[in-house]
Image (cartoon, helix red, strand yellow):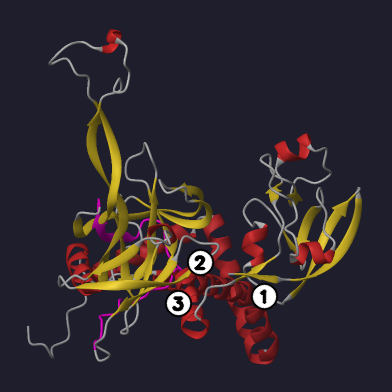
Amino acid sequence: MNMYDHPDINLKEVKQILDKFLKVLQNRAIRGFVLALIILLSIAFGVKIYFPQYFDSQIKSFLAPIEIRLEKLKNEELVKNQDLSKQADLYTSPISYEQAIIDSVKQASPSVVSIIISKNMPVYEQYFTDPFEGFASPFFDLGPGFDIQVPQYKQKGTEKKEVGGGSGFIVSEDGLIVTNKHVVIDKEAEYTVLTNDGQKYSAKVLALDPVQDLAIIKIQTNDVSKKFPAIKLGDFTGIQIGQGAIAIGNALGEFRNTVSVGIVSGLSRTISASGTSGFSEVLEDIIQTDAAINSGNSGGPLLNLKGEVIGINTAMAQGANSIGFAIPINRAKKDIEQVITTNKIFYPFLGVRYTLVNLEIKEKYKLSFDYGALVLAGEKGEVAITADSAAEKAGLKEKDLILEINGEKITQENSMAKIIQKYNPNDKISLKIIRDEKEIFIDVVLGERS
């Protein structure tokens, strides 16, 4: 058939279809439904023609709840996408895990140094003496060949010896180095820095952090034009549990720039760190990592997968596997700035010895509150109030319960030391105190601890 020809109509088939339709309409229920539908459509058409505004308003009122629901869903999706975007901004790695480690180590290693601790140690000479020499009695004479010789020792001068080691990292081109305080705490020791390219330099301790296990030392060189590779400092803000972590340091004081890899396995830890030299300190808000931190790693950098320093390796848990701790880099940033501008590291200082209140302390001392800082003397004679301190000048007393500082509540998670570190020396703060079951407020001008 030509495409322009009209198709033939089969009248017999058309008649059969009409007969079926008429047969269906003979059903009374169906006929009533069709009639009702025709009437409704006619009414709707009439309303639309003669009352268009009313018709439009009814349609809008019908659609309004649907539009509101759609808009709400749209906003919820937008907020969800924004939250995901913020989370992505916290820490993202655009490259492969293995390549990120390689690039980070390559970038940071030239700035990581080994610190050698040397000290003049006494040299002893051995000699022998007869303990019975000078006795005239024949009782002590055992005959020829039977002389008793007892070894004795005497000092024969001193000799400089290597007594320990640690790690650090260069943070400025003129040779400023961040390390741990316990690495360079011995005032009688000498410190030598061994750089990644094998060069040795003497180092001078510039400042020790009075609160954190941090110190700033500087390479000593006569070459004023010498520039050292400074490491890239990151930001502790936004760090997440599970993100990659790389530790670099002088492992065991023997293996320079040893690299270990793991993750950030915990945040906001509080630890009590101690060393063989008698050093002991309570550290708060510490990073926990399973990247291996060995003896000698102290003071080395903990990196993210962008090659940025996020922490300073400071301690390892004895008797455990893969539990190490690092101080957040933001603490060291403040120390670096203070040393550059004032040649010292300082903190605001209140001058009280206290214990944070929990349920056990509350019951023991019959307190009315389960939070705050209770001012107490130590069991070994440590005073509750430091002499001539800001606390003493303000009139604080032992057994005072300090509840708040400038309206900020003191808790186990938000200790008094953590709150005070937000301020500067000479700042005035208001303490909310319970004394003799009465609430009082005392203003204190903070002192300085350096």
Classified by dominant secondary structure, the portion drawn in magenta counts as loop
**Circle 2/circle 3 CB separation < 8 Å:** no
Check the picture and name the quadrant holding the C terminus.
Answer: bottom right
- Of the two numbered discs 1 and 3 on the same chain, state the one appearing first in sequence: 3
Label 2, label 3: how far apart the Cα atoms are: 10 Å
- Of the two numbered discs 2 and 3 on the same chain, state the one appearing first in sequence: 2
Q: Nearer the viewer, residue 149 or 307?
A: 149
Under mark 3, the amino acid is Ile
Give SS at disc 1. Answer: loop
Asked whether residue 239 is drawn in magenta, I would say: yes
Residue occupied by mark 1: 425
Q: Provide residue 77's location: percent of width, then percent of height.
A: 49, 71
Dot 1, crowdedness within 10 Å: few (<14), some or many (≥20)?
Answer: some
- Range drawn in magenta: 226-252
Residue occupied by mark 2: 209
Give SS at disc 3. Answer: helix
